[in-house]
Image (spheres, rainbow, N blue to C red):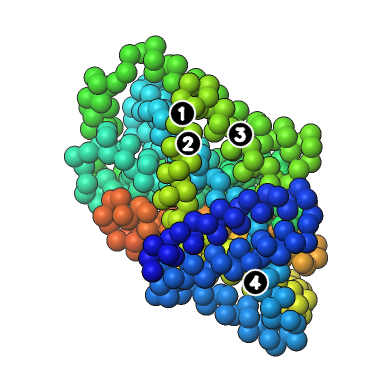
Amino acid sequence: MKVFSTWGLRLSITLYTLLHFFTAFFNNKFALSALAIAGLALFFFSLLYLSIQKFKLPFTIFICGILILLFSDHSVLNGILQGLILMKDMIGLLIIVPLIGWVLREEPYIEDIMSVFYTFINTSQKFYLSLITFTQIIAYFLLFGSIPMMYQFVNIILKDHHTEFWEKYKGTALLRGFALSTLWVVSIPSFIFAVEALGASLWLAILQGLGIAIIGTILAVTFAFFSEKRSGFSITPTLQQNIKLVLVNASPKEIRKKKVIEFFLLFISLFGSIFLIHGVFRIPLMLIIPLVIVGWICAFFLFKRRGYKLTRVAKEYVRKDMINQSYQLNIMLSVGVLIFALRQTGFAPTIVNSLHFLQDTIPFINPLFLLPFIVIILGFFGLGPLTVMVLVAGILSGMELPYSPELIVLSITSGSVISILISPVIMPVIALSASNGLSMFTNGIKFNWKYAIVFYIIVQTYIQIMVHV
């Protein structure tokens, strides 16, 4: 049964992906029907592969969607099939984006960058700042996989320091860095979905998110500074001694500089290609990003004269990595069914009317105050930022709120940041806990609750000023 479900899962994911890109360019009814059937097969084979115990969340969301369809007097079968293709752009993105990691694994880019910029990272505050910054950049390539990867790198330097004090220093930098990346990084699925669904300007959303991320980074360094002061222990001497030991075995200086330039060219080429093609051809971002990534990866391996590795990378990804995406893909499928079902009811107008009633009752509170809390609360029930963002943005896209879409994006993405920081049951915190051995409660709430409160106040201050201006 395991072999049958594995092969069925690979085939259904591959077929769904190919049909998604085909229907994106050719509006063929038969192909769309085949896409919905492939989505149903993907859901079925994932259920067999993972078992109902490990499949509770997507299964529950799926059943909720069916129940709502029953009460809305809409055709259940048609609703399921329509819902299974509603999130096809997001599923295509989720399948392709992890491939970027294969490029980053080809060369020791991070180690060489840190070696070249040694004088800029040789104090505790500078090193902490560099960790937050690089985690955001690496998140562009690896999503939340940037957390364990950056943790492994930090442990090369601080391998003998594992007390709670040191783990707080390392862990908060990585978790806050990744959380802040969800405000502006264009390859983060939750961010790009919110931008697309709400019709926000990509440039304004990124610039606004980047500005808040910079403020959040400064705030994080400030918190780390006072945490070190309260401990009475100076990190800098230990850090300098350990970095010097690592540099003894580093690559020659010329090679290091070459790799640093190569890394930033990779970043700019991927980032720039997406913006250029989107700006010139006006192709939807959810479609252009995966297509650019595939072309960019092929160009990288061919330029490095390692074209022979492309076949191996593709085989390994289909054989192993793609299967590991099945849980997240099925959450998107089931959320699609739920959103489609909700759109057949009076749910959206009811929410809008409730928000207007609240604002009339308490004039100084508007929906932008409350949207982050929806993401945060659902995060404590195990719904990750991507799932919540798709659900919330999908519902909000059918509403007419009297605010600029960029501010709505910032409001819900700020909730995503806080959810990542303090929810002990979502993947970023789980990934960090798996790396440093501390409990999810410690890595999340204990280390970050004060930072999360101040961050919320700062973001809301900006949002409310912009609303009134």
Q: Residues within 10 Å of mark 3 (few under 14, many from 20)?
A: few
Depth check, mark 2 against mark 3: the one in front is 2
The spot of residue 68 in percent (x, y) is: 66, 82
Depth check, mark 3 against mark 1: the one in front is 1
Residue beneath disc 1: 308
Residue 295: mark: 3
Q: Nearer the viewer, residue 17 or 245?
A: 17
Q: Earlier in the sequence, mark 4 or mark 2?
A: 2
Residue beneath disc 4: 337
Tell me which residue sits at (48%, 41%) in the image.
Answer: 314
Q: Is residue 44 visible?
A: yes
Depth check, mark 1 against mark 4: the one in front is 1
The CA distance from mark 1 to mark 4 is 41 Å
| Quarter of the picture holding the N terminus | bottom left
The spot of residue 108 in percent (x, y) is: 37, 28
Residue beneath disc 2: 311
Dot 1: what SS? Answer: helix
Relative to 114, say whether 75 is above or below: below
